[in-house]
Amino acid sequence: MNLTDLVVLGCVAAIGFTVSLFFAGVALPAGDIQDAAKMGAGLGSGERVRLLRAAELSDGITGAGQNGSILRKIARF
């Protein structure tokens, strides 16, 4: 996996996050159930940072450990 693959996966994940919020707003009645669904989508998308850090530490992303943080590479992209 290289940086380009990571950016494409990030875009797909962002689309999935947006769609999950849309479905939660349209399919569920307003109230506790809808709030829980939206919170679940938000917490699930927050895991991406933790997974990036884990991949960086294990050097699972090509070149992540050689030239600094993969998150810094994405910011420069």
Image: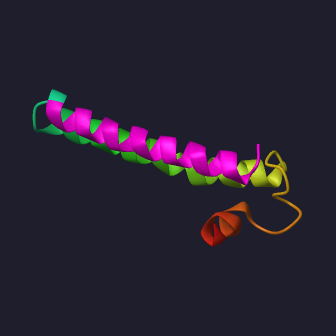
Image quarter of the N terminus? top right
Tell whether 64 sits left or right of 12: right
**Magenta segment, principal secondary structure?**
helix
Q: What's the coloring here? A: rainbow
Asked if residue 16 is positioned above or below residue 71 in the image, the reply reads above
Q: Quadrant of residue 17?
A: top left
Q: Quadrant of residue 57?
A: bottom right
Asked if residue 3 is positioned above or below residue 22 in the image, the reply reads below
Tell whether 13 sits left or right of 29: right
Which residue is nearer to you in this view: 33 or 10? Answer: 10
Which residue is nearer to you in this view: 4 or 36? Answer: 4
Asked if residue 35 is positioned above or below residue 74 in the image, the reply reads above
Q: Position of residue 53 (x, y in %)?
A: 70, 55
Q: Is residue 11 magenta?
A: yes
Which residues are drawn in magenta? Answer: 1-26
The residue at the point 75 percent across, 48 percent down is 55
Tell whether 37 sits left or right of 9: left
Q: Position of residue 56 (x, y in %)?
A: 77, 54
Q: Is residue 70 magenta?
A: no
Image quarter of the C terminus? bottom right
The residue at the point 61 percent across, 69 percent down is 75
Q: Position of residue 36 (x, y in %)?
A: 27, 38
